[in-house]
Image: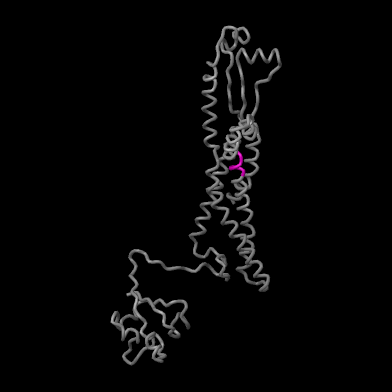
């Protein structure tokens, strides 16, 4: 539920954050004051993230590449990530509904096939969005931008204050003394919206990745996802771990007898009470009944014991 709320709220929050004026430029000094009184020039201006991106490319030329780079990290990346989060949540609805229908198995065969295909498409599309959401995290610069704005707000006045100083500027603007021009670039109170949108994106993306990782760890999480059809859980695989008994392979000697026309089945007890393979094999004796036999799934019969087709068996000893 939290993932759904954060993901759906991320898109309007991000859009509002990039369009809302969150920064302002203020210009002081004798020069700007005189030009404002004589020519009516207005130096103060407000910027949003989108207008700031456009301003970086106003001069054209190489500044266009600067505008594209800045826009990619400040505007396009966050919006694209929020869109992917919303799609990821919306695709979860058909996955849940179709998965429930497939598990119940009360539909006709044709309807079941259509729903299974739609389920696989929705499931795979939802899974494909996860690496995209994770990768788009590298195309967001809001956390760096917020820190940079604080540094610019602190350092910009003192840097521009010494560009040009003259006693005549004191007459035009006594409040700022001999300073002819001073530029300030400050963040407004609305910059908190950018911080909130950034936090929502980070939380929603983290929850989506964590929940996806938990789903992968569940053994029975898929319904015909791999393309083999069926409505059961994922097939369990037994892998060797440290401390488990080491499997030893032995030849199935009835394979050799099959070339000579013999059709004695594997595992049938002879007169001495031992298996044919155990009697003729030098690797194990008649006490292998306590071991756990593993047969190839390609062998016929129940568990591969019904008939011999020349395959090998693995025995834990």
What secondary structure characterizes most of the magenta part?
Answer: helix
- 7 relative to 238 in the view: left or right: right
Q: Is residue 76 magenta?
A: yes
The residue drawn where x is 60% and y is 38% is 68
Q: Nearer the viewer, residue 312 or 302?
A: 312
Q: Residue at left 34%, top 78%?
A: 250
x and y percentages locating residue 195 in the rendered image: 57, 36
- 239 vs 147, left or right, is left
- Total marks shown come to 0
The extreme front residue here reads 61
* Residue 22, position as x, y percentages in the image: 62, 31
Colour scheme shown: one colour
Q: Is residue 285 above or below residue 10?
A: below
Q: Quadrant of the C terminus?
A: bottom left
Q: Nearer the viewer, residue 28 or 196?
A: 28
In this picture, is 77 found above or below 237?
A: above
Going by the image, does 56 lie left or right of 235?
Answer: right
In this view, 116 is above or below 79: below
Along the line of sight, which residue is nearer the eye, 213 or 30?
30
Q: Is residue 4 magenta?
A: no
> The magenta stretch spans which residues?
75-79
Q: Residue at x 69, y 18 (%)?
A: 41
Residue 184 location, quadrant = top right
Percent across and percent down for residue 60 are 63, 31
């Amino acid at each position: 539920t939290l993932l759904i709320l954060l993901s759906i709220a991320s898109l309007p929050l991000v859009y509002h954050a990039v369009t809302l004026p969150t920064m302002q430029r203020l210009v002081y000094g004798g020069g700007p004051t005189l030009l404002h009184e004589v020519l009516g020039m207005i130096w103060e201006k407000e910027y949003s993230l989108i207008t700031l991106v456009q301003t970086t490319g106003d001069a054209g030329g190489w500044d266009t590449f600067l505008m594209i780079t800045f826009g990619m990290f400040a505007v396009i990346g966050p919006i694209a990530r929020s869109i992917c989060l919303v799609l990821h949540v919306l695709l979860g609805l058909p996955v849940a509904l179709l998965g429930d229908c497939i598990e119940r198995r009360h539909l006709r065969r044709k309807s079941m096939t259509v729903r299974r295909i739609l389920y696989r498409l929705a499931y795979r599309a939802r899974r494909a969005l996860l690496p995209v959401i994770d990768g788009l995290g590298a195309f967001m610069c809001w956390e760096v931008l917020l820190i940079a704005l604080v540094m610019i707000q602190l350092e910009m006045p003192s840097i521009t204050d010494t560009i040009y100083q003259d006693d005549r500027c004191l007459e035009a603007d006594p409040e700022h003394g001999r300073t002819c021009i001073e530029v300030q670039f400050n963040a407004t109170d609305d910059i908190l919206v950018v911080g909130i949108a950034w936090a929502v994106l980070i939380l929603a993306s983290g929850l989506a990745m964590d929940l996806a990782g938990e789903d992968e760890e569940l053994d029975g999480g898929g319904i015909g996802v791999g393309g083999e059809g069926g409505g059961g859980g994922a097939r369990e695989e037994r892998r060797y771990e440290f401390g488990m008994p080491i499997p030893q392979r032995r030849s199935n000697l009835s394979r050799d007898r099959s070339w000579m026309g013999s059709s004695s089945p594997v595992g049938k007890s002879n007169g001495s009470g031992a298996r044919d393979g155990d009697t003729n094999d030098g690797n194990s004796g008649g006490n292998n009944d306590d071991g756990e036999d593993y047969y190839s799934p390609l062998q016929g019969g129940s568990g591969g014991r019904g008939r011999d087709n020349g395959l090998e068996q693995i025995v834990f000893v």
